[in-house]
Amino acid sequence: MMKKSWKILIIAAAAVVLLAGLFAGFLLLNDYHIEMALNGEKEITLEYGDTFTDEGAKAALVGKWHLKKGKALEVSAEGAVDEKKLGEYTITYSAKVPRRKAEISRVVKIVDTKKPSLKLKGEEKITLTEGQEYKDPGFTAEDNYDGDLSKEVKTEGKVDSKTPGTYKLSYSVKDSSGNSATAAREVVVKKKVSRPAASGGSAGVTDKVTVIPGEKTVYLTFDDGPGPYTAKLLDILKKYNAKATFFVIDKGSYMSLLGRMKNEGHAIGLHTASHNYRKIYSSEEAFFKDIEALQSIVVAQTGSRSTLLRFPGGSSNTVSYFNRGIMSRLVHAVTDKGYRYFDWNVSSGDAGETTSTSQVARNVINGISGKRVSVVLQHDIKGFSVNAVEQILQWGQANGYTFKALDMTSPTAHHGVNN
């Protein structure tokens, strides 16, 4: 009986060993392993400012016979991507079971390939008269990663305003990623010539240094400001990307608007500081003293002198009759001092004919219609006139007109001198 029990135990033990061996062999031969794969690309390149979405990875425990289709495993990830900082980031995904572990990685690169925005202030083509001082209107440079790069802009080229010719100025800027932007400006210095006598002329008179613009060009001009409605006017002009010219007088605290006018590409002209007929037309000396008083304010607010001028009352005024011949002398004197004076060939009627916004708009639109070039007279100290500007711009742009600022080569629309 004893021998039989030992025999059974031995057989059982042998069976256990055999089964264990068979199971171990099965495990070995079944080749259990973890398979991993990324969802999405192994290497991802993102532009700075774009959003990174992690698609993750998947993992499964797979065998040769058992779990042939795999058993999904939980995947963990280490690493992060800073979308606001350029660089290369690695995210490592891992999965594990007892005695087995697998990893897979993804590389994410945050790069900046966008070139900076380099914009010129003022016109891309500027025309000067020989001897007229040139001051570059400047530029702005912005980068999506580095921000304001205006101080990093390099300028090449030089303008000799004493020598007639065409001068090329080039501007360039490079961001920290090596992306670069360029811009160019052309400055034409024209030979100074004598202006024909301003007598007996009619609207639209030009001289030898006048550059005739393209058809349907409108020069909106505003006298006697700046004032309480000028900021609103600047907003309207900006909305329609239209340029204008402001013939200013000394209006105290409102003169701070001159800097904005210049920065937004408008022209600033001189209309005397006082606009006092008796004072400014008493003599040539009195006129220029008043002009220089205004000039000093313009320089203080904008950093540069203005060479554009409009006589109070226009060159054809009769309010100066108390000093016979003063206008005939002044039209030549201002030219000799390097100024260019402008009258107008379209009147809005806002100086006394009407106080109606709709009538001002009609007057200007009717005046512009059919003209190749229009120099329009308005006053930005008149709220009803400023209110008409948006309608004028809408009509003009819908009908193919371009609204520009005056410069030293623009048509002068001179009147006949009556004194």
Image: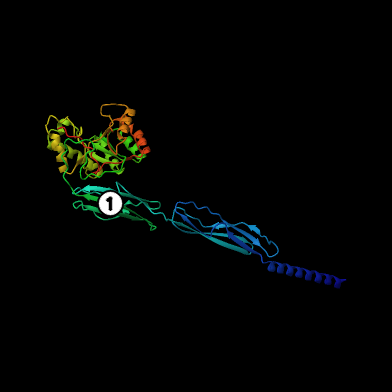
Residue 23 higher or lower than 221, as above or below: below
Disc 1 element: strand
Q: Residue at x 32, y 55 (%)?
A: 172
Q: Position of residue 115 (x, y in %)?
A: 39, 54
The reply to whether residue 277 is visible in this rendering is: yes
**Left or right relative to 133: residue 106:** right
Residue nearest the viewer, comparing 362 with 82: 362
Residue nearest the viewer, comparing 171 with 301: 171
Q: Position of residue 330 (x, y in %)?
A: 15, 37
Q: Residue at x 26, y 41 (%)?
A: 406
Residue nearest the viewer, comparing 208 with 325: 208
Q: Position of residue 315 (x, y in %)?
A: 19, 35
- Amino acid carrying label 1: it is Glu
Residue 167 higher or lower than 376, as above or below: below
**Left or right relative to 146: residue 220:** left
Q: Quadrant of the C terminus?
A: top left
Q: Hey, which residue is sitting farthest right in the picture?
A: 1
Residue 144 higher or lower than 285, as above or below: below
Mark 1 closeness class: few <14, some 14–19, many ≥20 residues within 10 Å:
some
Q: Quadrant of residue 381?
A: top left
**Left or right relative to 364: residue 53:** right
Q: Which residue is mark 1?
A: 186
**Left or right relative to 241: residue 23:** right
Q: Position of residue 310 (x, y in %)?
A: 21, 37
Residue 380 higher or lower than 167, as above or below: above
